Every structure is written in structure tokens, then in C-alpha cells.
Amino acid sequence: MVAYFLFELNMINTVHDYYLMPFLPLIYVVVSYGIHQLMQRNKLWQATVIVLCLVMPYFTMKTIQPYWQIEMSGFNNDFFKYRTALRAAAPADALCIMLNDHTNYIVPYQIDKRGYLFTGDQLPADWVADMINRFEAQYLYSDSRIVDENPAVAFYFDHLVVEKGSVRVYQLKSKSAITQ
């Protein structure tokens, strides 16, 4: 277990704390043993352990609750806030290009669309043309002004369908319109 811990320490140190899960049974055994030992002492220790166990859920909730807010997700809140309008911007069966979804799941789920996802502010114009020609992409959902204000990319836009907050939805030109 020590070798595993040392091997994963670098990942645990950054954002992958779930690598500690194999240690949970051991931690629970140690904590349970400690509680058992404290309960074997006098009545003051027993009362202290009981009070701490009763107030622990309250303080845990007060500490964790702010992190469950959309603002703390590290994600563009406009996809949550305007999801109804963004869903209605394109037909349900339209294939879409979606930008800045580092999870690969949140944007398609929020806007209820299928298509092609990109995680950064980089989408070459040639890729847009390729997705229109070969994969029949019809709409672009973008919260990246670097991409959608790029003239080479904007060439493939038919028109702006809707803009909600920082998210813009463009209808792309048809395959026949760009191959002429």
C-alpha cells in the first residue's frame, strides 16, 4: 500500500484525490477504533464523542454546501442559466459543434444536443469545413470570442441564431454552400 500511495502521490496532490479510496477501509477502522477507545473512558469523554458525532453532519453541510453551487463548478454558468433557450436554438436532431466543454458531457446534456466537442479556444476553420462536409454539422455553440470572431471560422456561419449571456449559437452554412 505504501508503494501505491507513493506512486499516486503526485496525482493525489493535484486533483485526483479519489485515488485515496483504497485507503478508506483502513481509515474507517482506525477512526472506529479511536472512537471505541474514547467511549471506554469516563462519562465526560463519552458525552464529548456523542456531541461531536451529532454536530459533525451540520458542520460538514455548512462547509460543503457552497461548493455545490453552479458558480463554483468552474464551468460557464450561462449554459445552465439559459439552457431552455439554447435547447430551442437548434432542432433536436441537429448535429452541433460545441466549444469549451472540458468535461465532454455538461454542454451536450444541458443543451440536449449531439455533436462534436472541443475543450479550448482553438477550433481551426479547416476543421469546421470538414465537420460540415463529412459529418454534416449544422450549428455551432460557442462561448469563445477567439473562435467565433475569427474571420476564417465566421466564413462558415450562415447566421447568428441566438445569443444568451456569453453563449452564441450560429447556424452553419450547408455543405453545398461551402463547396461552390
Image (spheres, grey):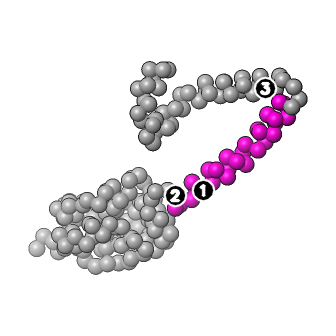
- Displayed quadrant of residue 152: bottom left
Picture coordinates of residue 167, whole percent (x, y): 39, 70
Picture coordinates of residue 132, whole percent (x, y): 22, 65
Considering only order in the chain, which callout, 1 or 2, is on the residue closer to the N terminus? 1
Name the residue: 62% across, 27% down. Answer: 27
Residue 67 is one of the magenta-drawn residues: yes
Range shown magenta: 45-72
- Identify residue for label 1: 66
Picture coordinates of residue 146, whole percent (x, y): 27, 67
Eyeballing the image, is 77 above or below 56?
A: below
Residues at discs 2 and 1 in contact (Cβ within 8 Å):
yes
How much space separates mark 1 and mark 3, taking CA atoms? 33 Å
User: Which label was assigned to residue 137?
Assistant: none
- Identify residue for label 3: 38
- Identify residue for label 2: 72
Question: Mark 1: which amino acid?
Answer: Pro
Q: How many marks?
A: 3
Label 3 sits on a secondary structure element that is: helix
Considering only order in the chain, which callout, 3 or 2, is on the residue closer to the N terminus? 3
Considering only order in the chain, which callout, 3 or 1, is on the residue closer to the N terminus? 3
Residue 147 is one of the magenta-drawn residues: no
> 30 or 97: nearer the eye?
30
Can you tell which of label 1 and label 3 is closer to the viewer?
3
Eyeballing the image, is 57 above or below 38?
A: below
How much space separates mark 2 and mark 1, taking CA atoms? 8 Å
Label 1 sits on a secondary structure element that is: helix
